[in-house]
Structures are given as C-alpha cells and as structure tokens.
Amino acid sequence: MAQTVAVPKGETVLRAAVLAGIAIDSVCGGKGTCGKCRVRAHGGLDEPGEAERAALSPGELGGGIRLACQAKILADAALILETPAPVSELAAARWKARPEKWRRPTLRPNVSKVCLPTAEFRQQPGASGFEHLRMALSQRGHRIAGADLEALRQLSEVWRVEADGITAVLTGSQMTAVEPGDTTQSLYGLAVDIGTSTVVGYLLDLRRGSQVAASGTGNPQAIHGQDVISRIHYAREYRHGRGDLQAEIVGAVNSIVGRVAEDSGVDRRSIYEMTVVGNTCMLHLLLGLNPVGLALAPYLAVTTQAATLTASTLGIEINPNGRVHILPSVAAFVGADTVGVVLATSLHRSPEIKLAIDIGTNGEMILGSRERLLCCSAAAGPAFEGGQIRQGIIAAPGAIERVTLDDEVSVTTIDGATPRGICGSGLIDALAEMLRYDVVDSRGRMVSPEAAQTLLPQGLARRVIRDEEGLHFVLVEGSEAFNGQPIAIYQKDVRQLQLAKAAVRAGVEILKKELGISDSDISEVLLAGAFGSYVNKENAAAIGLLPVVPLGRVRGVGNAAGMGAKWALLSTGARREAQLIARHAQYIELSARPDFQEHFMAAMDFPASAQSAP
Ligand code: FES
C-alpha cells in the first residue's frame, strides 16, 4: 500500500516514515549506530555518509539500502519497506495470539454499579437528588463519600425524567457516573502493561472476572530508541520531547482500547477503570513527568507512589469519568511491572525463598519470601530482545527462536517464516550450542576459521568466517534468508551477550549475598515476560544466566507483570497488597555496590560445564 507524505527538504527518511504513520525499528534512536533502520530507498536522497558506510556493506549500499535515520530527503523519494510491519508490531501481535493460563484473585473490583428505581428519589421533600441517591445506595450497603461534578451533571439530566431507573457507577466510595436505565450488565476494565518495546492490554469483565479480549502494539516511542535511556535523552534534548513521548504512549493505549472494544463488541464507554503497570520510566512518560532524574546519579524517580487519575485527564479514551490507576513502583529502575510480577506470582507470600527474573530491555530481579524481599535492576541492555546484536530482532515472525547444532545447523523460526534475524531465545540457544561444539570457548572467544577446520565437523567449520565484517558463525545462508544476507552470530554479539548475562547474574549474586543464601536455598526460579516464556531453560543455565539450581525448579510464568495489572483490576485487596510490596521490597542499587564489578567480572565467562560437545 503506497502512502505519500510531504516533508521539508533535509528531513530524514525515518522522520518522514513516522509522519506517514509508518513505524521503523530504530534501536539506537537515530544515532546511526544500530543499523536496524535499514530500508530500501531511492530518488532524491543525499549521498550515504560515514555512519551508513560503516553500517552497510557495499552490496547493500549498491542495492539502494539506506539507514532511514541517516538518509536525508532532498527531493521526491520513494521508500520501500520490505517487512509487512515493524517487528515490534509483529511481536505485540504474537503476545496477543498466545493464550495464557491465569489464576485470578477473589473478585472484588474497585468499580461497581447499582441500579435504583427513580421513585426512591422523590420521597423526602427538601432533600437533594444526590442525598436521595446517597440514601438509596446506603440502604443497599454502599457508602458514598462524594460525587464527581460530571456525575452530578449526569444525575441532573436523568433523575427526574427516567422512568426505568438510573444506574450509579461507584469507584471506591466515589460516585463517578450516573447513567439512564439499568446498565449494570455492562461493567468492564482494562489492565495495561506498558513495556519499553510493547504495550499489551487485557479487557476484563468486572462482573465475572473473565478476560474478554486482549491486544498489543509496539511501543511507538521506539522510534526514539529501544531502551529507556534513549527515551530520556529524547525527553531532555527536545523542547517537545516529553510531550511527544506522552502523546505516543497515550496513542498506543488508545489504539489498544479501540481494538479490544472492536474485538469484543464492548462499548469503550463501558470501560470504567484501567490499571497500569510499567517500568518507572514508562510511567513517568505516561504521566508527563520529567524522567531526567532516572538517568542521572543518584537515580531518583519523581514519584514511585500509586496514582489514580480521571481517564479524560490523561486523554485515555475509556469512559471519560473512568479512572486510571497506576500501580506503585519501588525505585527508579524497579517499576510497577516488577510489583506486578511479585503480586501475580505471590512471591511476597511464599514461605520458601524464590527468585523472579524479568528480562526485557533491562533485567529486574526479585529474591525473597514472605519474610523479606530484595530487588534490583541490572543494566543488561536490550541484547536479550535482539538489540545491540548485529542481526538481532525481537520475537516476531521470521525470528530464529531455536538453534541446534550437530554436523550442521538447524534453526526454527517463529511461525515458520523465512529467517530475518534472531531473537533472544534463539540467541541463548545459539550461544549454548556454540559452547557445546567449541565454536566459542568459555571466555567467549570464537574459534578461528583455520582452527575450526581441525576442531569442528565440516558442516560447522565452513560456517566460521572472518572477513571485513569480522569473525562470525553463519546460522542461515543468504540464499535462505529474508533479505538475502546471511544471518550470523558475530564475535561482538557474543561479547554483548556476555555483558548482558553477566549483569543479570551479578545482580542475582548480590541479592543472594545480601539475603545470606546460596543457590541451593532457592526453591524456585520464575522467569517472567516473553523472554522467560520462550527461553530454553537448559540453554539459559548452560550459558550461566541462571543460578545453579535443578532445572525442575525453573519455570516460565508468562507476562506476570500484566497479570499483576489484571489482579489489581479485579481485586481491591490485590491493589492494597501491591502497595505493601512496593513499600517493603528493599531495593539494592547495583551501581552503588563496590562488589558489583567483582561479581560482574566473575560472571563474564561461560560455565566450563557447557563445553561438552557430544
Ligand atoms: S542506525 Fe538508524 S536507528 Fe539506529
């Protein structure tokens, strides 16, 4: 489908695409360093500059491939996107498609509806309409502390004229809406998990506690960079930056509202409450708070408190009188998403010590039991989501998700699509297998092409290549790949993964040290998020990402953060528990730990046990 957009001369192709409503993956936020924004473009463009010549091969440049963030438009130009949608969108669609089992709390939502006969409003001369309504509700066991002005306006329209009664919408002890007739059958809420890469929403029937629809979308802020630091940079550097970021995330949530409403046939005005989890930075950006303090020592959030706002204040297109409840965070880099993980896994109630690891664009770890909870965040970077990896992409159709080696290489892609890159679970597999087959050693050094000839089976040896792109191991030949370029693991990728896994592992080691326990004291390791659901735990253990526990104690728990948002939507008790978790979880700032470097360096190498080629 062709689209045309007019932009000022000198504008980048990336910006033009954004203006046309087309998202292009731009991991580095347009700095020209990640190479992820490759597009085929031709026409009135400037000549490729230094960044493009460094990132693109002569073949790619000759074939019209450009970096969208670098190529500038000087006259009419055509841009051809070779993917049906940016990978972040595809990944979000995959989230939606994956059915998740979930346990729900005792149903006690914060929002309820009561239908009252209008006749009850005319009994006591002198009493106001609201007083009548308050008394009628009190007789039914509902204590009303106050009413929104908008609810009073609605009451003024209906209470004297509606023959079929009216329905009061109660949010906690506040009357937030009044509707003509009996609308008690229609009561919905939306639980939202705002991730740095994807945003997912779940529409729940608040009368039954059941999920009626789910939808996800790529986080549109990704055009400013894949990690939170790039977003903070954008908020700080551009006068309109913070406003842009807020508008983008509100737009993403509203697109989810629209999709779940359409899929379920539920009127969006029947969605009366929304609960939100997300990392602290995403929540700052949703609220329009300046996030700069999160990125500068001593790394302070403006607030970590729970917040409840009227939907219309934020521009969220559910019932305008509805509420948006944002769960509390723990610290600058341990957000409400982590609180959601604890809530949904009941880690805070566990008599035994458990470890939860949520790996996304950062890695958050929580260790403890009902006695004590410790948490930290490791700057693992987006390597496990394919960021910082030369041909890494997030989990989307065409991403290599499984890799096995024997005499040859076998890969499996998501949805069986033509390979177009490698995602986190594929990277872990590839690395573990490369260790087992001595393609890399325990220090992370890749075997040379010469040594490979004697050390490796021929089918593997021919895949070890050193050229102007560097030393790499080819997983998929160019003839079998989506864009005709071989898909390989480069020496630099191995280093990035070592850094990422060492950061996570060092965090876990420090939490253990602080709690005074060893690996054997951990009764269960819970892997949260998309990565945790898909990763091969044996391979994750083989590269040293996990503490040394029997694999039977390692379990994927799906989108536990989103589950926590669902719980908070369905249960006021769960919401109170979230407050307690945020208050009592003890945050360990890893950058302030003098022993971090020591643990980090110790965790850089791969376990020697991984090297056991059959
Ligand atoms: S190279 Fe263009 S966004 Fe990173």
Image (spheres, rainbow, N blue to C red):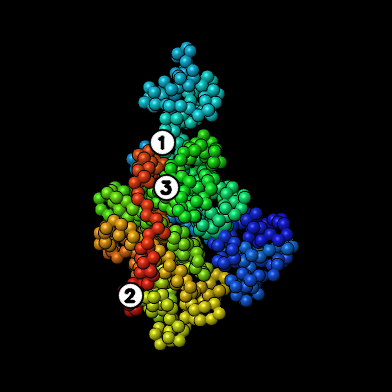
Mark 1 or mark 3, earlier in chain: 1
For image coordinates 66% across by 58% down, the residue present is 16
For image coordinates 49% across by 44% down, the residue present is 264
Total numbered labels: 3
Mark 3 or mark 2, earlier in chain: 3
Residue 145 occupies quadrant: top left
Q: Amino acid at mark 2?
A: Ala
- Label of residue 329 in the image: 3
Which residue is denoted by mark 1 in the rendering? 110
Whether pointer 3 and pointer 2 mark residues with C-beta atoms closer than 8 Å, the reply is no
In this picture, is 29 found above or below 266?
below
2 or 1: mark nearer the eye: 2
For image coordinates 42% across by 72% down, the residue present is 430
Q: Secondary structure at mark 1?
A: loop
Quadrant of the drawing holding the C terminus: bottom left
Q: Closest to the observer: 180 or 424? A: 424
Q: Secondary structure at mark 2?
A: helix
How far is disc 1 from disc 3 in space, using C-alphas? 20 Å
Left or right for 249, reference 349: right
3 or 2: mark nearer the eye: 3
Image coords of residue 521 (percent x, y): 25, 59
Which residue is denoted by mark 2 in the rendering? 608
In this picture, is 424 found above or below 63?
above
Image coords of residue 425 (percent x, y): 42, 65
1 or 3: mark nearer the eye: 3
Q: Amino acid at mark 3?
A: Ser
Q: Residue furthest right?
A: 75
Image coords of residue 43 (percent x, y): 72, 66
